[in-house]
Image (cartoon, rainbow, N blue to C red):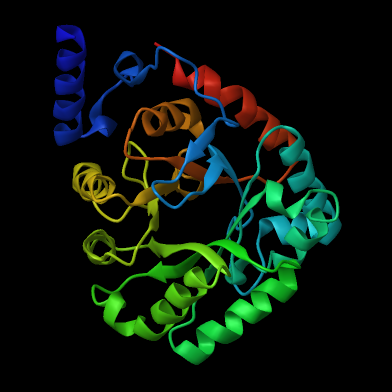
Amino acid sequence: MKCMHRREFIKSSLLAGGVAAMNPFPHELYASEKKKNANDIIKLGDTGIEVSRLAMGTGTHGVNRASNQTRKLGVKGLGELLHSAYDQGIFFWDSADQYGTHPHLKEALKYVPREKVVILTKTHATTEEEMKADLDRFKQEIGTDYLDIVLLHFMTKDNWPELKTGAMNVLSQAREDGIVRAHGVSCHTLGALKAAAATDWVQVDLARINPYGSRMDAEVPVVVDVLKDMKKKGKSIIGMKLFGAGELTDKLDECLQYTLGQDFVDCFTIGQEDRGQMEDLLTRIPASSTRG
């Protein structure tokens, strides 16, 4: 127990000084005694939702309802990749209206039972009318009667809870009606992240996290403190930008091990563009988790 306390103290000290400054990366401080796998089943707080630790990200460079996945694979190709992931125990699919991947999920659902997968999508709706229209359209595009997780996408303003009240009200009612199982936000500034931590409505937060602060909302220690506060309040945290939107591809193992070592991160999404990338993660995640 004393050894564990010392290890946690050192990790906290490193966070305060910046893990990025450490060379080589302190693997021994984040190594797990038990392997953590991409297909581990994780409970998202009190939402009642269980997901695979790894989510299939479909929005690499996603904008204007297109992404690397849609451009390279098309509807059938991405549908097949999601089906292949499901066969490997990866049943958490991360999509968004902005990525244009709803039809691709619908294609995958031709081969996978709807109730066996968890679908997360995101909306830019602000008003009640916009949110109602998006929910109806999303369900039609995906071919489902319900959505597991719906997030308000790309929050940047400190007062987003005030600006998005209409959409939030619709999502709250949709959850009561069984159309949505959980709701929350994805954050892209420190102010928005702090607002998410302070807002009871948020059940799930999609947050940027990696040990080097790449493409994050603030310096690593600052973000970590906010995310820990979120976790204490019962919110579920899904990590994103683990590889800094491609800036940290030479540090994959370090980024994975760091995130896997954070108790406040429930699971994470990584954009995968082909089967080779998916299979690499299936191997790399458990290996990284125990690397000492």
Residue 99 in picture, x, y percent from top left: 62, 66
Is the residue 60 above or below the residue 252 in the image? Answer: below
Where, quadrant-wise, is the C terminus in this rendering?
Answer: top left
Q: Residue at x 70, y 66 (%)?
A: 102
Instruction: Looking at the picture, tell me which residue is in the foreground, 143 or 206.
Output: 143
Instruction: Looking at the picture, tell me which residue is in the foreground, 241 or 51.
Output: 51
Residue 182 in picture, x, y percent from top left: 47, 61
Q: Residue at x 73, y 34 (%)?
A: 276
Residue 73 in picture, x, y percent from top left: 79, 54
Is the residue 76 above or below the residue 290 in the image? Answer: below
Number of marks in the rendered image: 0
Where, quadrant-wise, is the N terminus in this rendering?
Answer: top left
Instruction: Looking at the picture, tell me which residue is in the foreground, 80 or 24.
Output: 80
User: Going by the picture, which residue comes out furthest to the front?
Assistant: 177
Residue 290 in picture, x, y percent from top left: 45, 15
Q: Residue at x 26, y 31 (%)?
A: 19
Is the residue 28 above or below the residue 118 in the image? Answer: above
Residue 12 in the figure: left or right of residue 166: left
Residue 211 in the figure: left or right of residue 2: right
Residue 206 in the figure: left or right of residue 274: left
Q: Residue at x 46, y 44 (%)?
A: 247
